[in-house]
Amino acid sequence: MAAPAAKQAKPQASLPPRSAFLPVSRADMEERGWDCCDFVFVCGDAYVDHPSFGMAIITRLLEANHYKVGVICQPDWRDPESVTVLGRPRLGFLVSAGNMDSMVNHYTVAKKHRSTDAFSPGGEMGLRPDRAAVVYGNLIRRTYKDVPIVLGGIEASLRRLAHYDYWSDKLKRSILLDSGADLVSYGMGEHSIVEIADALAAGLDASDITFIDGTVYRAKTLEHVYDYELLPSFDSMQKDNLEYARSFNVQYGNSDPFTGKRLVEPYSDHEFVVQNPPSKPLTTSEMDAVYRLPYARAYHPMYEEAGGIPAIREVKFSLTSNRGCFGECAFCALTFHQGRIVQVRSHESIVEEAKRMIADPEFKGYIHDVGGPTADFRHPACAKQLTRGACANRRCLWPKPCRMLDADHGDYVELLRKLRALPGVKKVFVRSGVRFDYVMADASDEFMEELCRHHVSGQLKVAPEHVSDDVLAAMGKPGNDVYQAFVRKYEAINRKYGLKQYLVPYLMSSHPGSTLKDAVRLAEAVRDMGYMPEQVQDFYPTPSTMSTCMYYTGVDPRTMEPIYVPKGAHDKALQRALIQYRDPKNYDLVREALERAGHADLIGYGPRCLIRPTRPKGTAGDSPRRPDGAPAAGRPSGDKRPSGKQSSGGRPSGGKRPPAKGGRPPAAGGRRGGRPARRG
């Protein structure tokens, strides 16, 4: 059923003409005088021609390299005719599930169906299948037996080798084998897709395209594969998940484009999946060229009647300034997808895009964000990364910042000042995530002062994730003392300038390594912050992250040491409830958690207690139940505990809540800016 368009999307004030977009029908092709397309791009998202959407970048890049590209978005996967609307392409089909993994798009971490899809017309859910890249690949293969198929995008990239699938709770084969495709282009894909196109245009068979960095292909023998490292076989990983942990650690160590080796994953003695080394990072001039392409910067007008595409609203007036991240949070897939080497656009490129944005009739003077995976990363972690790559066995920021780290925000500050100075700009926000440990490593306070004075709107969202140093170590995040030091600096600078601005921390429950005692410590920290997060991000085991490997195998693949993993639905519910202990519906779960953790001392009437000895009135019938249907342990109803007050950091505060402008404290752990959950 379609979601109400008025609630999900707001039609654009003015749309570019249909001719500004690539063809989506035979009529569009005929208008351009095309008999056929060179490539047809099949995507699980609706058609939005904006550089925040991977489909737009790849199709426009191929167009700039003189290829004719047509687009089929959200085809009916039950109807083979849906992939024939543009006819047989001359060179091949390109397939992407879309900007988000289709399973994350469809399901919450509790495996419940989501109700809306921001990447579909009017926010309607159900217009793409589960595991969309596999389904589309097989649909095309059944319809066109011998046309090359290339998979790309986040879903394919993170499933390029054997991977743990949370939704089926199984180890799955490389997506290359299950999709019927010929190649996977992994990572961001700009380099590899043009090389693939040129190879196909030169007459090479898809089976002979084995030499392009950033691709994965299948081989019947290893006779012509050289300089490779052999991974554990799929059969051995199915029998022993520790073999998967060993394999993942090798993959992780070979994710750098300068030092990464070719990897081979055996499936039988006559079937191998070969991953070539990652593509080299884009130079600044290459990044600038990507963002100069002639995007329509809007959704296709065919969606206007349905209310447009909601996802465009969050990015239309935001600027991407970088990609890649050397933060290496264990629960984040960026190391596998964008890599650790930060790539940036020039100031000139970003300012030019900002001027185009200002000219838009809908622009109200506010640039919503200037950033990327991590907003304040504007150059590689150190100079050597651009020639020798990132260190294989060290991290740039964890457990402490590397002595070679170039922690300097000068370039970012200069960029923000240029954008603020543009005529028509009232405010420039920084919303895509500030890496607080990188800020603390900077000897200068210039960036923090600029941030507080000019780029925060009452609340700054940061991602400490937890307070237990053991859990933070498993996450690859800095110790809690670093966050507390950041809190003190943030408060001091705001006091200096007479500003009332707050910190809103993103928190995560049930991450591998988090015991019930750790969860109680986090609940106590929430108590001391003075407010209850309305939402909490429960750890979501998505493919190809370090944390997902821990979740599946029960070991840290970096050390092969056992790690505690809260897996059961009830165990996870206990940890989640503790963070939202003030919600009366969570009373029984919180009480059970405190008693199991040996913290009955936090049940009572004292100022440090989390809950009272008796259940709040009116909640006896609402208490959460165990997965087997039995009610969680509880007590008779009683008085309702009053809520606390908002604080700007990790300590109790008698201050008032943030001003009404910001509303209630935002959900801790949700998505930001319409992008997949990624926290710096």
Image: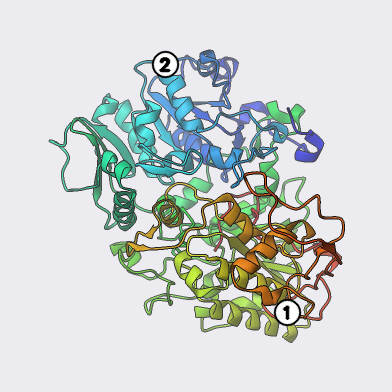
Who's the residue at 54% across and 21% down the image?
77
SS for dot 1: loop
Upstream in sequence: badge 2 or badge 1: 2
Task: From the viewer's side, name the closer residue of 593 and 265.
Answer: 593
Q: Is residue 450 visible?
A: yes
Q: Quadrant of residue 574?
A: bottom right
Q: Which percent across, then down, holds residue 458?
A: 76, 69
Who's the residue at 31% across and 52% down the image?
242
Q: Quadrant of the C terminus?
A: bottom right
Above or below for 140 versus 425: above
Residue type highlighted by circle 1: Arg
Tally the marks. 2
- Is 149 placed left or right of 532 in the picture? left
Q: Which residue is mark 1?
A: 608
- Is 166 placed left or right of 231 in the picture? right
Residue furthest to the left:
223
Q: Which mark is residue 142?
A: 2
SS for dot 2: helix
